[in-house]
Amino acid sequence: MGYAQGQLYTTTVAGFIEEVWQYMKGQVVDALPGTFPAWFKNLLATMSLEAALDWTEVMTRPYTGKHIYEELRGLSDGGNIDYQTLVRVHMIASVTQGKCSMIGAWGAAVQSSGSDDGHLIQQRSLDWDMDGPFRDFSAMTVYHPNKDGSNGHAFVNVGIMGFIGGLTGMSEAQLGISEIGVSYPDATFGNESREGVPFIFLLRDILQFDYTIDDAINRMANSRRTCDLILGVGDGKLGIFRAFQYSHSYLRIQDDMNMMPYNTTWHPRIKNMVYYGMDWICPSYNYVLSQQLQKYYGSFSPEIGIRYVTSVEMSGDNHAAYYDLTAQKLFVAFAAPRASSGPLAAFDRQWVQYDVVSLLKETL
C-alpha cells in the first residue's frame, strides 16, 4: 500500500512533502504546527531539525509496525518522493500536539425517534497549523488493505494527501477515532517519553486492525506510549464511546460517570456524553461546549452539532468531522485552501455528508 497513491497523485504528494519540509525548516521552533513536548524542544536546542527527527525515528521504530514503513516506501517509490524526507514529515506530526476537541454522545443524549434510537455520535475537530501548506492538501483516503482480511479491514482516513498516519477516520468495523494534544496537563499525567509508538500510527492501527473498543483499549494499554494526549474511540456496534487520558505513565478510561478533570462550572459531567474542548485544563472552551451540549441534550445529532455546537465553540480550523457510527455516516468540513474565498476555518465552511458503507464498497 502507498505505491498506487504515489502513482496516482505524484505531483500532489510530492508537492505536499516538499512544501511542508521547507516550511518546517523555516519555522523550526516558534511557528511549527502544534506544541512540542519538552523532550523534543530539548533536542532542537542541541541539534538540527533533521538530526532531531532522525533520532526520533530511531527511538520509535521498534514500536512501529513494519506495514507503516512498507507503505511509506511504497508511497516514495510510486511517487518518486525522497524517502527520508517523507519519514521526517511523519515524525514531526507524531511529536506535535495540536489543539483539538472531541465529543461522544449516546443514549438519552442523542436525538431519538423510531429507528434512530440508540445511535452513537462522535465528533473530532483538528485545530492545527493554518499558516503553512497543510490546508492546501486536504484529503479523504479510502483504504482497502486486502480482500481476505489478513491485513486488516477497510477504513476511511481523513486528513492530508500523502500523510498516512491516523488523525481522523472511521472503519468498516464501525470504530471512530478522536485526538487532542495536551499542553496543560495536571499531575495525574505523570511523565512523557521519547521512546514508544507514535500516536499517529497507533490511531491508524486502531482503524485498520481493531474490531471492537476493547481491542483499541488493549492496544493502548499494551503499547509503549509517549506524549500527553486525550484520545477518543467510539464503537458503533456496541454503542460505546470512551475517552482516554493517555500518557507514557498512565492510561485512564473516561466515561460519562468519571470524566476528568471534574469541575461543576466549566467541565460538568453530562449523562451519556463525554467531551473535551482544546485541552485537559481549558476552562473557556470546555465551558462553551458544556453549555451547548446541555442546551441540546436529548436532540443531539451531527446536524445539531455542526450548527449549534462546533460552530459556537469554534474548534476545528484545519478540519472537523462528525461520525454517526451506528448508521455509518460521516460528516466532514475542511479549511479553505490558501488564496481561496469564503470563511477560512473548517467549522465555518460547507460540510459534506458521506455514506461510509458506500465509500467502502467503491472498487478500482
Image (cartoon, grey):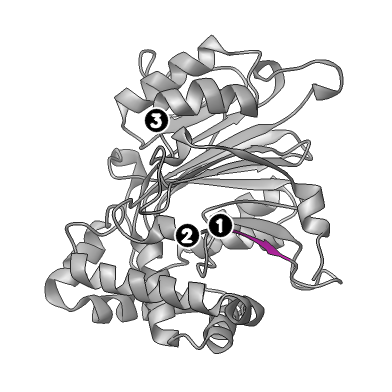
Residue 223 appears in the picture as rendered: no
Q: Residues within 10 Å of mark 2 (few under 14, many from 20)?
A: many
- The crowd level at tag 1 (other Cα within 10 Å; few <14, some 14-19, many 20+) is many
Q: Answer above or below: position of 198 versus 73.
A: above
Any mark on residue 203, and which? Answer: 1
Name the amino acid, label 3.
Met
Residue 258: give x, y in percent of width and height. Answer: 51, 26
What residue did someone put label 2 on? 199
Q: Residue at x 63, y 54 (%)?
A: 218
Give me the C-alpha separation between circle 2 and circle 1: 6 Å
Image quarter of the C terminus: bottom right
Q: Tell me the residue at 63%/29% (across/down).
A: 302
Asked whether the residues under the numbered discs 3 and 2 touch, taking CB atoms below 8 Å apart as contact, a structural biologist would say no
Residues in magenta, as a range: 139-143
The disc placed on residue 314 is: 3
Nearer to me, 278 or 39: 278
Residue placed most toward the observer, 209 or 251: 209
Q: Label 2 sits on what residue type? A: Phe
The residue located at (49%, 37%) in the rendering is 349
Mark 2 vs 1: CB contact within 8 A: yes
Q: Is residue 15 above or below residue 158?
A: below
Q: Is residue 347 magenta?
A: no
- CA separation in Å, label 3 and label 2: 25 Å
**Coordinates of residue 174 in the picture (x, y in percent):** 74, 46
Tell me the SS state at disc 1.
helix
The label on residue 28 is none
Residue kind at label 1, given as amino acid type: Leu
Q: Secondary structure at mark 2?
A: helix
**Residue 266: horizontal and vertical position, in percent?**
36, 18
